Amino acid sequence: MGRLFGTDGVRGVANADLTAEMTLGLSVAAAHVLAEAGTFEGHRPTAVVGRDPRASGEFLEAAVVAGLASAGVDVLRVGVLPTPAVAYLTGALGADLGVMLSASHNAMPDNGIKFFARGGHKLADELEDRIESVYEEHRTGAPWDRPTGAGVGRVRDYEEGLDKYVAHLVGVLPNRLDGLKIVLDEAHGAAAKVSPEAFTRAGAEVVTIGADPDGLNINDGCGSTHLDQLKAAVVEHGAALGIAHDGDADRCLAVDHTGAEVDGDQILAVLALAMRERSVLRSDTVVATVMSNLGFKLAMEREGIRLVQTAVGDRYVLEEMKEKDYALGGEQSGHVIVLDHATTGDGTLTGLLLAARVAGTGRTLRDLASVMQRLPQVLVNVPDVDRSRVGTSAELATAVTEAERELGETGRVLLRPSGTEPLVRVMVEAADIDQAHSVASRLADAVKSALG
């Protein structure tokens, strides 16, 4: 069996790849593994279980609850809430385990299951590996001790979850949002109630789109992967800015008052300066991935903020932040982690902090985001090549050196083997888009020649 857990839990087409049986089995296995690790020692264990609005989440939630309760874990069912809300409530309620059912920005037929450890932190890789192993043992018939009588888990709805999470979000803002009109695109997802409530409590005048989930329309032409509706709505309503979430609201992209997109790099830049001003940007450092735009790096250098770069993936950003105690990190895609207030990317929190900066300074988001200039970025996928030789080919190294010499300090080259497909990704940034296309095309040809 290949590894079930990816970088963000277990995902697949619901009821085909990710079945009720698998979800139940993984939940039982998680309970047993955490019990073995001593997490439950000395007390009766509790888990927080939440989901996004996908139709499949209804039966998968039932499977998770059944699995945990059958393994002797009490369950607090919080219903439809964002992934970061489940993480927060896991910590705030002192639960031993958190479970979120969501496939994030994926299309509706997909779903996923993600586990959080005590405190709301992602499970360590070795615990995920052990869960897979125990799941497979049980699946192939290995017996396990089943509690009976009063030993089985009890299940109750925790209806206070939304209010508790929203109060937390509003409580960490440095200032209110009074006087701002903001359009929120909820992607017909998990934040459809949470996000408008939080922005309204913080003082903003809120216009919502994509806030009517029916179980089938999540991410359908809306949200952070489809910004056109938000851009039009911001201009139509004369709003100060727009905020877009994905299906589980762990990411945030923005639109300024002119309808121009503000991506994750620009959001990070704005928040980094705001946090340094308030003396909460520890070590004057921000963490981002190697795919961040070169314009972000140049802006941070100019502003005297140190940039630490990691491999692609918010999990690597988070690992670096936790290890070195940094306060801010994120990705161009809009996963932004403010570690003092969240254990994972939190799109609602990010949007609130961005809006608070606009309200607190009296400047437009367009003006604030201009702290960095996004350099044109071209990405080319080169298929059917030996991706394992990217770092060892002398021919390719020579081509990269020539490209870097041509681009100078105002450009950048990144060659990255895909983690899942037999292809190499060529990324080129340059001050001029035509030059970026030209260099990327030549490098793609060099990859085919050297690795084909």
Image: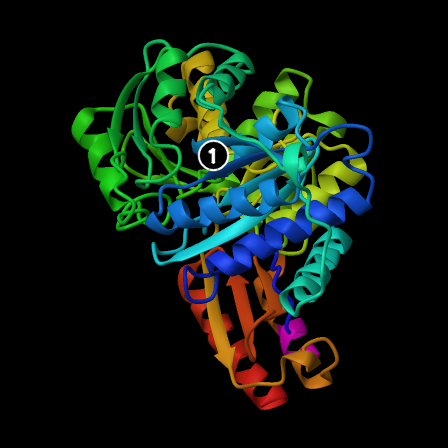
**Quick check: is 400 in the magenta stretch?**
yes
Q: Which residues are magenta?
A: 397-402
Q: Is residue 374 visible?
A: no
Residue for point 59% across, 40% down: 69
Residue for point 77% across, 35% down: 40
Give 161 or 158, whichever is nearer the viewer: 158
Q: Quarter of the image containing the C terminus?
A: bottom right
Q: Is residue 203 above or below residue 58?
A: above
Q: Is residue 135 above or below residue 320?
A: below
Residue 211: percent from the left, percent from the top?
27, 34
Q: Is residue 391 visible?
A: yes
Give 137 or 420, whichever is nearer the viewer: 137
Q: Which residue is mark 1?
A: 347
**Quick check: is 324 in the magenta stretch?**
no
Residue 20: percent from the left, percent from the top?
47, 56
Residue located farthest toward the front when viewing the structure as drawn: 149
Q: Secondary structure at mark 1?
A: helix
Residue 198: percent from the left, percent from the top?
41, 19
Q: Residues within 10 Å of mark 1 (few under 14, many from 20)?
A: many
Q: Quarter of the image containing the N terminus?
A: bottom right
Residue 173: percent from the left, percent from the top?
52, 15
**Quarter of the view holding residue 189:** top left
Amino acid type at circle 1 is Gly
Q: Is residue 11 left or right of residue 134?
A: left
